[in-house]
Image (cartoon, rainbow, N blue to C red):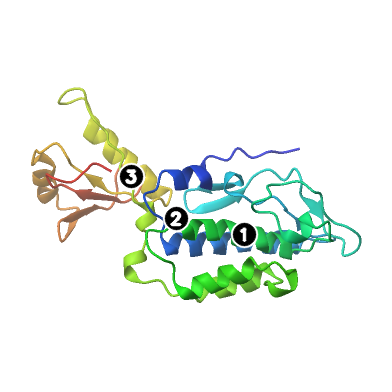
Amino acid sequence: MIEEYIQGESLETFVSHQKSISEELIVKLGIQLCDIFTYLHHLSPYPILYQDLKPEHIILCGDQVKLLDFGIASFFTGFGKNFQLYGTSRYCAPEILRGQPVTPAADIYSLGRVLTELSDAMSCRCSRQLRCILEQACAADPADRCQEACDLKAALLRVPLSENQQSSHLIRNIAVIGSRPGAGATHISISLVSTMNQKHIPAIYAAADGSASLLHAARANHRLIDQSGIFIYGSFRTMGTVYLFPFRRMTAL
């Protein structure tokens, strides 16, 4: 058996650290989970029913989503009772609780419940289009839901996202503080930002010490590209792009 170490945080932990959730996050998360279920539900010779989707089992690894704990997953053979009466009742499809045969539509229901909970955490009401999609995914009758994860994905792809929804859920502040001048906080901060961008995790460095040293250095370095006060350093020790905000009142990221 080969096991993969997954470095990231659960959706449950991620949401607990956010002030609000954007519709963009809900849509993008839903699309990735649909891709996972499309793969599981079309495995040969027997598709796999996950049956235990909940925020604790969804791991965010940068811009990727992964599932943990296949302990109660089962094969879908197309006949007989392909289910186990386990899982978390809040996300469990009604047909499982009724003791009826389970189809891939049960995973669609659980996904709809997870995304609905996320929509409830939004600072503003989600769009009518997304709300209708989630209501259909959570229909009590399996026949009223999308029968394929790819159908749910297609519906989510049609949800329009306004500019003010773009990536607001990704904003986090990481403060790097030196115990004394020259301790290396600036170097560590820029290295951290460079590494994060290399791993496709968007990050910006912003000076917060009140000094103008970074601003002067940025203006003196001809390899930096100035875009309205955001200085782009194309290569920091060949690790990737670094975006610098050398302004006084900004917070270090």
Q: Which mark is residue 194?
A: 3
Where residue 202 appears, as percent x and y from the top left, is: 36, 52
Mark 1: secondary structure: helix
Quarter where residue 193 is shown:
top left
Where residue 235 appears, as percent x and y from the top left, is: 29, 49
Residue nearest the viewer, comparing 57 with 215: 57
* Lower position in the chain sequence, tag 3 or tag 2: 2
Q: Which mark is residue 177?
A: none
Q: Is residue 120 left or right of residue 102?
A: left
Mark 2: secondary structure: loop
* Lower position in the chain sequence, tag 2 or tag 1: 1
Quarter where residue 238 is shown:
top left
Q: Is residue 230 left or right of residue 84?
A: left
For the residues labelled 2 and 1, say whether their Cβ atoms are less than 8 Å apart.
Answer: no
Mark 3 or 1: the one toward you = 1
Mark 1 = which residue?
Answer: 111
Mark 3 or 2: the one toward you = 2
Mark 2 = which residue?
Answer: 121
